[in-house]
Image (cartoon, rainbow, N blue to C red):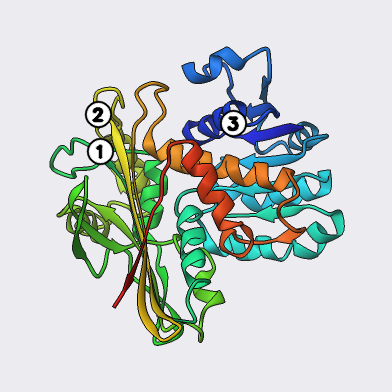
Amino acid sequence: MRMLVLGAGLQGSACAYDLLAHTEHDVVLADLNVDNLPAFLQPYIGGRLTPVAVDANDRTGIRRVMEGVSATMSAFPYYFNLGMSVAAVEAGSHFCDLGGNTDIVLEQKAVAPRAAAAGVSVIPDCGLAPGMVNILAEHGIRQLDVVRKVTIKVGGLPQKPQPPLNYQVVYSLEGVLDYYTTLSWVVRDGKQMQVKALSEIEELEFPGAGTLEAFHTAGGLSTMAQRYEGKIPTMEYKTLRYPGHAKMMEAMRDIGLFGLEPVNVKGVPVVPRDLFIATVGPTLRKDYRESPDLVALRVEVEGTDKGDEVLLRFDLLDRYDADTGITAMMRTTGYSLAITGALQAAGKIKPGVWTPDEAMPAREYIAALAERGVVIQESRLVR
């Protein structure tokens, strides 16, 4: 089969690599610029990999590259996801994306009747978080008779943190700031509500990563807060960073440095967030060979099973792969997207629009990750 990956950045390139390395499918990798693909893709060019230049804003061009493909995996920025999913349905292609914006996911849900009629599946939010964490949370929920609490914590971090922020860009600084400024959905006392990003900081010890802090950010729950309102008393998603990061970012946010409204600077309108990204971005972007990254993940589901008090825990610690030059964030995010698309193309997902927690076969997904060296540690504590 022929698979289409939209976006030749970090995550899209990792997704394309995974399809080439772990399936027999041919891959089309489409983006505005496909001239400088990473070294790990070069051996496949001219064989099973076909780079194609296309503008995400060119609807005709997008439809052209979607023709005849079994599944489309989008690593384009989240604001393209609704249009891309509609185009895929019209082209008769399964579709999944990295998501990250719950409002857009809810809009994609409205495409369900058209997707079902076309016999294709659409799965938004298929990266690491949202994506992997939601599949693991649902996997835990389905193992218990009664669920009282679901907590999700995940973060992409430098293995060698450098002050003052102890952070480096592992995907998109613009995306990070979106998560730091958007309200986060949670479930409290069985009711869905929103809390402020960077709030309710807590510390935890994570084996292999040391002391980390967790705080609320947007997007990670996908639509699970809406699905489980009135069914599960407590559910929340938090981002992991090294201690002290949240307070510094909160201060910068609250004094306006992440703002989107232009301010007058010596007669010139300047968007504070654009200036922040332009100024801070180069400092936070590191050569991964010199400053490798890691991904730490913990999903916990608490409740009862046959009368026993049970805590189910899913842990992951993944690191930069020096052999391929693929980062931990690319492995956990891009590979997750590829696995989803491959399962869709294989007919494992029923037609319609589903989030990963609704549709993905957890055991098969976890096994596929393990084949790639992304190993989820599962534990069950009976209290």
- Name the outermost residue toward the right: 117
Residue 199 placed where, x, y %? 26, 68
Q: Position of residue 48 (x, y in %)?
A: 68, 20
Location of residue 289 in the rendering, given as x and y in whole percent from the top left corner: 29, 22
Q: Quadrant of residue 103?
A: bottom right
> Does the rendering let one see residue 84?
no
Tell me which residue sits at (45%, 85%) in the image: 191
Disc 1 target residue: 158
Between 316 and 282, the one lying in front of the other is 316
Q: Secondary structure beneath disc 2?
A: loop
Disc with the residue nearer the chain's start (2 vs 3): 3
**Residue matched to label 3:** 22
The tag earlier along the polypeptide, 3 or 1, is 3
Mark 3 or mark 1, whichever is nearer to me: 3
Q: Are marks 1 and 2 in contact (CB under 8 Å)?
A: yes
Q: Residues within 10 Å of mark 2 (few under 14, many from 20)?
A: some
The disc at residue 205 is none
> Which residue corresponds to mark 2?
291
> How far is disc 2 from disc 3 in space, using C-alphas?
27 Å
Check if mark 2's residue and mark 3's residue have beta carbons within 8 Å.
no
